[in-house]
Image (cartoon, grey):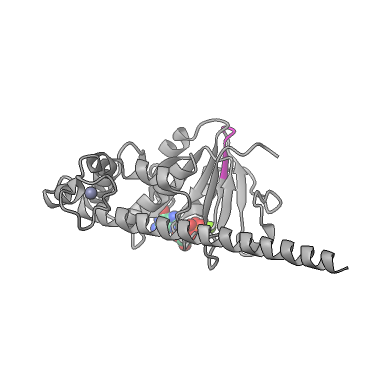
Amino acid sequence: MYPRKSIIERQAVGKQGEKQIIATNIDYALIVQAVDRDFNVNRIERYLTICYTSKVSPIIILNKIDLVTEDELSDMIRQVQERVNEVPVIAVSNESQVGLLELQETIQKSKTYCLLGSSGVGKSSLLNNLSRKELMKAESISLSTNKGRHTTSHRELIVLEKGGILIDNPGMREVGIADSTKGLEITFNGIVDVSKDCKFKDCTHTTEVGCAVIEAVENGSIDRASYENFLKMEKEKEHFESTVAEKRQKDKDFGKMIKNFKKSNFNKY
Ligand SMILES: Nc1nc2c(ncn2[C@@H]2O[C@H](COP(=O)(O)OP(=O)(O)O)[C@@H](O)[C@H]2O)c(=O)[nH]1
Ligand SMILES: [Mg+2]
Ligand SMILES: [Zn+2]
């Protein structure tokens, strides 16, 4: 087992306050979005937060560019770049093979990559295209701590020609935001910078007088959609944190009860 460098995790589906480990020891995440119905900058920010929280470097892949015109594509790239800075954006098509060479050159030797993105965006197609080598079914390389729950996740891992490793992940429908303070700070660094000028230190940037963030949204220097996404994810994070705290307390109470039970029974006999 390799030492764990990074962990990509999500909130376990249907399990409040529990995290589910998706993949470990990842250097880079390829955040794949298709430029058709799937295209959604809010979701890109969500994946970015997960990457930064997990100390994984993101690369944004816009796939299926054969389905749109050049103008439509530039418009989408512009939308991404308006809200996301310093993350490479690579436009590709598995159909026309455009951009695959650039992507291949980006993938460095002996680094580990994972594919993130909704189901149907073309992750498997990309993986197949990026390697002419045989697919290794890596069911056994389950790096998860709770193996039993992964009945539906079908992981695939390939070794790329240049020696890198690429892991295909199942689409994540309910990506939760666990321990994501740092990740949110990096993803929304523009908002966080401006918030230093808020009148109140504990400003929630929602209704406060003297909120520099609200002012920046109103004068257009902060993108409104990005601001709304930030608030939404902050709220989710807080909810997640409070359910974790609640769960810990419950576990503690339960532990105490067991201990007391043992004690009282021990005293009885
Ligand atoms: N037009 C077009 N279709 C694609 C492209 N890449 C994948 N697809 C199709 O999209 C569907 C889903 O692809 P798949 O690789 O299984 O997506 P995954 O669920 O993310 O692994 C399949 O029907 C693919 O043939 C592309 O670049 N252009
Ligand atoms: Mg797939
Ligand atoms: Zn504020």
Q: Position of residue 5 (x, y in %)?
A: 58, 37
Q: Residue at x 84, y 69 (%)?
A: 268
Q: At which x and y percent is residue 193?
A: 26, 39
Extreme-front residue of the structure: 267
| Residue for point 24% across, 47% down | 74
Q: Say whether residue 63 is visible.
A: no
Quarter placement of the C terminus:
bottom right
Q: Relative to 124, is 67 on the left or the right?
A: left
Which of the 4 image quarters holds residue 60?
Answer: top left
At which x and y percent is residue 28? Answer: 49, 39
Which x, y percent locates residue 246?
Answer: 52, 62
Residue 102 in the image: above or below residue 237: above
Magenta region? 162-166
Observer-nearest residue: 40 or 49?
A: 49
Magenta residue check for 78: no
- Asked whether 173 or 127 is in front, the reply is 173
Q: Is residue 140 left or right of residue 187?
A: right
